Amino acid sequence: MQDTGEWHALSAHREALDGVHLRDLFNGDRHRGERLVAETDGWLLDYSKNRLTDETVEMLAALADRAGLRGRIEALLDGEPVNTTENRPAWHAALRQPDPPPEVREELDRMAAFAAEARDGRWQAVVNIGIGGSDLGPAMATAALGAYADTGLDVRFLSNVDGAHFREVTRGLDPARTLFIVVSKTFTTAETLANAITARDWIAHAVGAEQAGEHFAAVTASPNKAQEFGIDADTVFAMWDWVGGRYSLGSAGGLSLMTAVGPDAFADMLAGMHHIDEHFRSAPWNENLPALLGLIGIWNRNFWGWPTYAVLPYSQELALFPAYIQQLDMESSGKSVRADGTPVSTANGPVVWGQPGTNGQHAFHQLLHQGTDIVPVEFIGFCRPNHELADHQDLLMANLFAQAEALAFGAPDAGDPHRQFPGNRPSTVLLGDQLTPRSLGQLIAVYEHKVFTQATVWGINPFDQWGVELGKTLATKIAAELAGMAEPSPTRDSSTQSLINRYVGSRGSVTR
Ligand code: F6P
């Protein structure tokens, strides 16, 4: 894309904005903050506090057209094989269609029946075992929708192979009343299998090996492997190969969430996702929330050169949202070759980080306000809380508005160099009416399609993740050596081998 006229025009346009402060842009245009916004169904995107003009938005829209974004969206939503390196669709949109494909409908019905049973009082706790996309989405959404969890069921998430995680997640649980849902698309992920085996032993120890299987369900694209593990076919749910792990919350990958909030709330979340799918398909670029977020992401990453951005939800319920976005964005966008195998020639995949406001203000906002690097921020907040403490909500939102204001406009020269607030630091605000299952679904889909918009401009395939494979292969070899099942590699570097030797010489079980 960087060889196109649209890209060159944007580069020149960006240079013309050198030295233009956000203060100038607002002072010269009294209605900028009302105009540079987009809305859909209870969500407002205010992008006016970015270093851009109306002309920038038009030029970015032209870039989107040049990249063929409209056609790519059709291909994505219609289930064409957009995941070219794995030759399959990335058809998460099918999961949330009002009239989904029959196999999807059937699985949703099976999930609803299973969830209804799981919620009827037999179980004290449901523990989701999975990692990456088989953990981050349901864990984030279950926390986000805590106000909608209408039974006493305690839904927990076990992901890390670190035994401390097993210890903490199972702390206080009665194995006789605990149900595990093992979520693994491949059913080969080492961390998940290790945790599932430990969970099975923990259950068997309490209720006997014959009964242990009743305490397990699985969600996978490899049902045979789940059954070999000892999980009855009746409680094995499908995850199709055309659903990527980090896009799988709307599939049976969200089963633990459904046990927490029930099938109706889950359906509302799917409806919210579908709303954004159709919005993405049809809204003009300058009214299209995911496309605008993505195009502004391109503008900030490629034309201003900022390598990182922060996602800051002013919502404790969205505490896990930044971690969820880290996988969604960084596993999708961190690529060094384009979909056609040629090397990329522009930067992509920004580093994403963040945590909820107001906590972050007392941790890292110092750097956002006065640091030498510019970090564009995406603020997320809501007009109505899911609690009765209205004064807390006012205080929370006052902080969101104040942070965006301070970043953009800074403060007049204070004399003291340490107290300078230069401002001109870009941010975007996503303001929702209320965090509900529907609005959460919308928020998730906005970010999914933001990532897709950027990938389309960069020409990369956002749906594969080959970069995670080498580490898995090496860990498997080292684990075999640690277990005494293999000899040390004679070609291994001296640092890695010395560290392994040191570990082997010092390892042991619990010492207190
Ligand atoms: O870390 C790589 C990855 O493949 C992710 O993309 C995926 O979400 C995660 O591992 C878990 O994979 P699985 O669901 O197959 O256990």
Image (tube, helix red, strand yellow):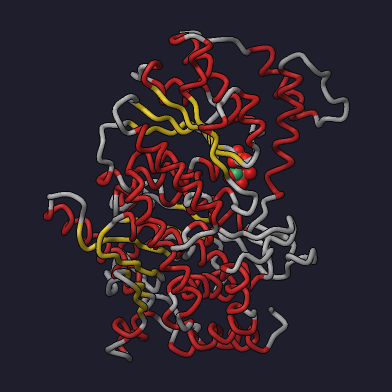
Instruction: Identify which residue, 484 or 268, lies in the foreground.
Output: 268
- Image quarter (top left, top right, bottom left or bottom right) of the C terminus: top left
Query: Looking at the figure, which quarter contains the N terminus?
Result: bottom right
Q: Which residue appears at 49% of the width and 9% of the height?
A: 208
Residue 163 visible in image: yes
Residue appearing at x 55%, y 27% in the figure: 232
Instruction: Count all numbered tags in the image, as a single digit.
Output: 0
Who is closer to the viewer here, 160 or 204?
204
Q: Position of residue 7 (x, y in %)?
A: 64, 83
352 displayed left or right of 226:
left
Q: Examine the rendering and report whether any part of residue 312 can be seen.
A: no
- Relative placement, left or right, of 313 versus 339 is left
Residue 461: quadrant of the picture? bottom right
**Point 43% across, 51% down: residue:** 322
For the point 33% across and 48% down, the residue is 144
Give how far across and how far down residue 218 sits, in percent.
54, 33
User: Whole-percent x and y of residue 240?
Assistant: 61, 48
On screen, residue 142 above or below 101: above
User: Which residue is nearer to you in this view: 172 or 312?
Assistant: 172
- Picture quadrant where residue 178 is located: top left
| Residue 448 image position (x, y, % from top left) | 51, 61
Image quarter where ligand 1 lies: top right
Compared with 195, 188 (above or below) is below
